[in-house]
Amino acid sequence: MIIGIVGKPSVGKSTFFKAATLAEVEIANYPFTTIKPNHAVGFVKIDDVAREFGKVANPRIGYVQGKYRFVAVDLLDVAGLVPDAHKGEGMGAQFLNDLNQADALIHVIDASGSVNQKGEVVETGSYDPANDIKFLEVELDYWYLEIMTKGWEKFARTIQQEGKEIHKALGKQLSGLGVDEYLTQEAIRKLKLDTLAAKDWSEEQMYSLARELRIKTKPMLIAANKCDHPIGKENYKKLKEQFPNYKIIPCSAEAELALREASKKDLINYIPGEKEFTITTKGTTDLSQNQKNALEFIKKNILEIFEEGTGIQIVLNSVVFDLLNYKAIHPGGVGKLEDKDGNVIPDCFLMPAKATALDFAFRLHTDFGKNFIKAIDVKTKLPVGKDHILKNLDIVEIMSSK
């Protein structure tokens, strides 16, 4: 799974990325600081299921903090997009192509309205962040449209002459964007397009199809950054009313980055996504008064005000569990939760919503899938069949003939 982080320049996108991953990336308040895409690992936060058995998990990948387990996801930070990116503005075509592999998008916007459409700093509140949501939708739609319509007339005519089904051919052509023939067939049916006259589809029909496929394959969540600013709070409320179809989460990337870096240095005790922190013994002596004042500001103006805390962890969890509808499944044994090295429930896999016991068996190893006998729900100790739909936070033991 890859989550793309997108937005125009200078809205705090790289700060968001660093706050989510603590990766070393360049952060500056001018357009196109990020040129090449940055890859790093972020983490979604789930309950540590080992606690139900009086134990603490020992993740092979990720970590446990308090009563929570943090499971790795791949984050991709691409350079800032500007209007007409699909036409190549601001190296936009290259940056859009970097998003091919993304399963979902986090659109970071500056809710305080302090950056114009080109990513240039302007007076706070003078720019309407709603424009950013609209412009990115258009850029992504036209990006899909251009890929879809390249050589369209010849493509559609050939399909018709050879008697091929348009949805299958189109699904194959757009497979690099995560489109398949089933999604294409569903979109064509929804838009009531005549499959026998594809070469005569109008520009409006083509655009509608491109948009439908983009929405299905690049679902998007809005991270309303800089909501700790008074104008940011006001704009956030307006955005929620104006875009009811989007999940919009208020956040402060700078605040989260400050908290995570202080926690990394053992100056504070802080669990990502929580609404509180405590200063450690080391922090009491090593933090300057200015740093203590900054932490107090974060506490009073962000953590105590916003239900989502700084918002960064909530954004990551919402993309994976709400937008993509994934679930966290753990391999384990009814009689023993430890592996051969004594690690408790060392693995956790993020699986699609409809994943079955058999799907999970194949995820663990091809041989487990091919030689599947049954699975056992470790919590209930009851056997389940191959078609059993797994639930979030399940612990499953796979029984196979090999």
Image (spheres, rainbow, N blue to C red):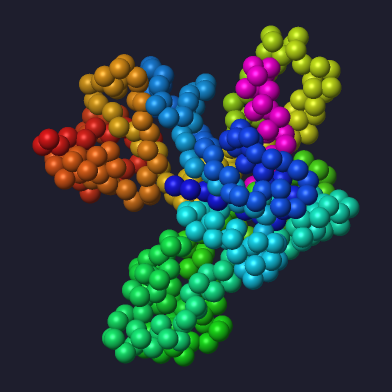
105 to 284, vertically: above or below: below
242 to 383, vertically: above or below: below
**Which quadrant of the view contains residue 277?**
top right
Residue 182 horizontal/vertical position (percent): 35, 68
32 to 396, vertically: above or below: below
Q: Does 6 sit left or right of 168 as displayed?
A: right
Name the residue located 67 percent from the left edge and 54 percent from the top edge: 80
The magenta segment: 247-268
- For the question of whether residue 396 can be seen, the reply is yes
Question: In which quadrant of the rendered image does the C terminus lie?
Answer: top left
Residue 267 horizontal/vertical position (percent): 68, 17
Q: Does 367 sit left or right of 186 as displayed?
A: left
**Which quadrant of the view contains residue 275?**
top right
- For the question of whether residue 380 can be seen, the reply is no
Of 49 and 35, nearer the camera is 35
Residue 388 horizontal/vertical position (percent): 25, 46
Q: Does 56 sit left or right of 253 as displayed?
A: left
Residue 7 horizontal/vertical position (percent): 66, 54
Name the residue located 40 percent from the left edge and 71 percent from the top edge: 173
| Magenta span includes 383 | no
| Magenta span includes 261 | yes
